C-alpha cells in the first residue's frame, strides 16, 4: 500500500521500477535503490556492456545481486554469486568485499536484468524508537512512518494529525521534512508529545483541541498562506489513528463525529482502526481507495485510505 502511494504503481515480485527518485531511507520497507545504468536479457548481456559503462578512477568496488525473480527465473545462493562474478570480472579495477568505495547492484525484474549503482537503505526510523514518553498502544515507528508516506507521497503535502497522542506520527513526518500539525484533547498526551518532540530537537507543532471543534477556515494559517486559495479544506491529507483501548470500544457516535470532522479538514484521510468500520466510513461520506492490514501477533490494525465527496 505504501509503495502504491509513493510510486503510483504496483510492486512486482518485491520490486518497483520507477522514474521517481525517492530516498531509499524514507520507507522502512525499502531495502535499497538501484540507479539503473544497463539493461539486458541475461547476465552475459550486462557483462558485455559493463566495462565501457563503469569508470572507477582508482576506487574499489563490489557487486551484489539485490533481488528479483518470477515464475520463470529463480535465484539460489550459488546462482546469485555466479552472476556477480560474471559481471565483476569485466570491470577494470580492484574488488573489495567489506568496505568498497562504490557498490553496484544487479537485479532481475520484468524479464530483464538491470545493473547500476546501489544505495542501501538506512534504518532512519530506528532513531525515533526510544522515546522518553512511550505509550503501549501507539503505532510502532515503522508503521507510523509508512502511514505518513501513504498520506504524503511528496514532501509538499500539508498534513494534519487531529488525534496525535504522544506524537509518533508527527515525529515521523517531521523527520522526513513533511509539513504537519497535530491536535489532541488529552492534556497528558500532549505533554508527552511535546517532551518527545523536544527530545528529538523538533518544533512544537501540537495544540490542545477536540478535533470535532476544529474549523478548517481557521486552520488555513496553520498550514500555509496558500491553503485559503486552494479551497476550504486546510490540508491535503489527514491521518486519523482512532483511539484504541484494551478495556473499552470507542462509542459509535463519537467515532462518526471524528470521521466527519476529518472529512472537513482534508480531501484525503488515512484511517487507522482496530475495528471493521466500513459502514461508518461510507456514512461519513468517504470512498475507500486502498487498504491493508498490519498484524502484530493476533492483534490487527487496518490502514484505510479514503477520499471525501
Image: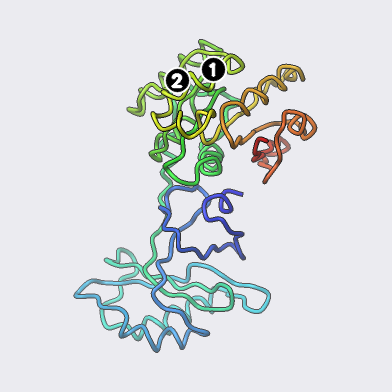
Q: Measure the alpha-carbon separation of dots 1 and 2.
A: 8 Å
Q: Position of residue 113 (x, y in %)?
A: 50, 78
Q: Is residue 225 left or right of residue 169?
A: left
| Residue drawn at 26 percent across, 80 percent down | 93
- Closer to us: 222 or 180: 222
Q: Residue furthest top?
A: 187
Question: Which class describes the residues within 10 Å of circle 2: few (<14), some (14-19), or many (20+)?
Answer: many
The extreme right residue here reads 279
Residue identified by numbered label 2: 206
Is residue 102 left or right of 210 when viewed as pictured?
A: left
- Dot 2 falls on a residue whose secondary structure is strand
- Give the vertical position of 223 relative to 254 (above or below): below
**Dot 1 and dot 2 residues touching (CB under 8 Å):** yes
- Residue 249 lies in quadrant: top right
Q: Quadrant of residue 246?
A: top right
Q: Position of residue 281 (x, y in %)?
A: 73, 32
Instruction: Name the residue tied to disc 1.
Output: 184
Q: Quadrant of the C terminus?
A: top right
- From the viewer's perspective, is residue 10 above or below residue 117? above
- Name the residue nearer the viewer: 97 or 242: 242
Residue 129, position in %: x, y? Answer: 46, 34
Amino acid at each position: 500500500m505504501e509503495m502504491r502511494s509513493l510510486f503510483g504503481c504496483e510492486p512486482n515480485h518485491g520490486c518497483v521500477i520507477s522514474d521517481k527518485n525517492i530516498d531509499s531511507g524514507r520507507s522502512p520497507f525499502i531495502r535499497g535503490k538501484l540507479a539503473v545504468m544497463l539493461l539486458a536479457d541475461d547476465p552475459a548481456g550486462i557483462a558485455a556492456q559493463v566495462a565501457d559503462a563503469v569508470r572507477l578512477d582508482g576506487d574499489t568496488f563490489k557487486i551484489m545481486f539485490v533481488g528479483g525473480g518470477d515464475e520463470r527465473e529463480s535465484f539460489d545462493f550459488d546462482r546469485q554469486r555466479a552472476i556477480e562474478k560474471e559481471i565483476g570480472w569485466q570491470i577494470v579495477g580492484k574488488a573489495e568485499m567489506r568496505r568498497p568505495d562504490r557498490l553496484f547492484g544487479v537485479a532481475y525484474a520484468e524479464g530483464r536484468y538491470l545493473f547500476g549503482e546501489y544505495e542501501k537503505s538506512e534504518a532512519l526510523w530506528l532513531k525515533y524508537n526510544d522515546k522518553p514518553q512511550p505509550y503501549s498502544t501507539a503505532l510502532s515507528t515503522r508503521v507510523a512512518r509508512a502511514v505518513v508516506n501513504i498520506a504524503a507521497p511528496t514532501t509538499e503535502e500539508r498534513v494534519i494529525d487531529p488525534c496525535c497522542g504522544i506524537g509518533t506520527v508527527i515525529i515521523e513526518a517531521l523527520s522526513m521534512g513533511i509539513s504537519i500539525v497535530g491536535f489532541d484533547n488529552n492534556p497528558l498526551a500532549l505533554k508527552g508529545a511535546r517532551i518527545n518532540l523536544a527530545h528529538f530537537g523538533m518544533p512544537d507543532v501540537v495544540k490542545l483541541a477536540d478535533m470535532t471543534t476544529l474549523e478548517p477556515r481557521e486552520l488555513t494559517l496553520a498550514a500555509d498562506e496558500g491553503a485559503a486559495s486552494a479551497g476550504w479544506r486546510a490540508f491535503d491529507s489527514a491521518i486519523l489513528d482512532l483511539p484504541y483501548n484494551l478495556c473499552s470500544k470507542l462509542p459509535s457516535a463519537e467515532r462518526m463525529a471524528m470521521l466527519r470532522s476529518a472529512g472537513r479538514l482534508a480531501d484525503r484521510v488515512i484511517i487507522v482502526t482496530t475495528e471493521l468500520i466500513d459502514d461508518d466510513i461510507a456514512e461519513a461520506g468517504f470512498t475507500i481507495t486502498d487498504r491493508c492490514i498490519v498484524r502484530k501477533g493476533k492483534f490487527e490494525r487496518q490502514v484505510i485510505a479514503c477520499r471525501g465527496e
